[in-house]
Image: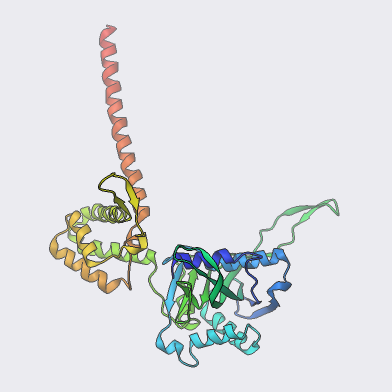
Amino acid sequence: MLKTDISELKRRLKPGKCVPSKVSGCIVSTNKEILATFHTFFGNLDESDQIMYLDIMGKVLGGKMDNNALELSFPAEAEEEGGAQSALLALRDSDFEDEKLKEEFFKKVINGYYSTSEYVIFLLHDVYDVMDKTSDGIKLDESSTMFDYIICAICPLEETKPGLIYSHSEQIIKERIRDWIITEPEIGFMFPAFIERETDVHSVLYHIKSSDNTQENFVNDVLGCSMIQTSDDKKVVFAEIVTKALQEEEENVGRVIYGINESLRDMIEVKMNVQDPETGEITGTKTTKEDVEMSNTVIKEVLEQNEVAEEKIEVIQKAFQDEIQGTTSVDQIIDRKLLVKEKFQRREEELLLEIAALKEENKELKRKISELTK
């Protein structure tokens, strides 16, 4: 999915712009038991409740693409009758009115989702009348397609901390009643995917709050898909590949990895900004960070810039193809935290050298003053 597709849907999830048909769900205990269920027309909710429901659903569409928002494709078996994709289609088309379908879905989620706390499963059904656009992005007052979709959000429950409150009505200080707060979605999904402003029933947008908690069993059992590598995964794997290839030069590995990240960052900046040969002005291009692919040519170029031997370049190229899944952009590989950390470390080293030089200069001044006062 494109960022523009997700942004378009997120902008829609506001009261007045979006009037979903139904919201449904259940509350699950730590023992995997359903404690309560809920089901209502969205329009019957108070406006304040609508805002909060839409805020939760909007978070399923939030986060960084390829790290928190992942486009997963259904394998052929998931699209066969009785497969995960056909079950999701049936759930969507039922508008949550088929209790048996909902019960089966909740059971799948409960069995596939790992949690140490109670949590809420939210379901929202909406139909978006997708307005046509002109080539320059201006919306027309007509549409040629309807995007019929569901969003599922799974939100852990947290008990409020104990404390004291002042009761105005009783004019006393007493213990606060502890409530259960619904937190941000830990995982969630939107089905079908919305790709280039069209419905794609062969894909699903999967949301994870943290790349450290991908809930692979949920992906396999509920969505019928296979988990893909996140951007964070790819950064780690690439660093491991380079480290392993250069293990004989242990002391230089850190320097080389930093240099590679720096070269990749500079490459993106060059491709995104083209200098006008006549005026010298920097002109933006349609190239985005996501467009620059991490190809064998790119790998060879940045490794050569950092003086990696030819035979090791071939080893790194092969390992990259074997161990990093799917199409990968250069931006997914760049470890920007490492670049920032190294920048501060280098500045710290510069400052320490400056301080040492100033101390020597101060000592020399004191010596000269001492000689003049004799």
- 127 and 138: which one is in front? 138
Answer with the quarter of the image where residue 108 lies.
Answer: bottom right
Q: Is residue 288 left or right of residue 320?
A: right
- 287 and 28: which one is in front? 287
Q: Is residue 345 left or right of residue 56?
A: left
Q: Quadrant of the C terminus?
A: top left
Q: Position of residue 323 (x, y in %)?
A: 29, 72
- Residue at horizontal 30 percent and vertical 21 percent from the top: 362
Q: Position of residue 342 (x, y in %)?
A: 32, 48
- Residue at horizontal 61 percent and vertical 64 percent from the top: 55
Q: Position of residue 132 (x, y in %)?
A: 51, 71
Measured along the vertical axis of the image, is residue 98 above or below residue 235?
Answer: below
Q: Quadrant of the N terminus?
A: bottom left
Q: Position of residue 202 (x, y in %)?
A: 44, 82
The outermost residue toward the right is 170
- Residue at horizontal 30 percent and vertical 31 percent from the top: 354
Residue 266 visible somewhere in the drawing: yes
The outermost residue toward the bottom is 81
Answer with the quarter of the image where residue 298 lies.
Answer: bottom left
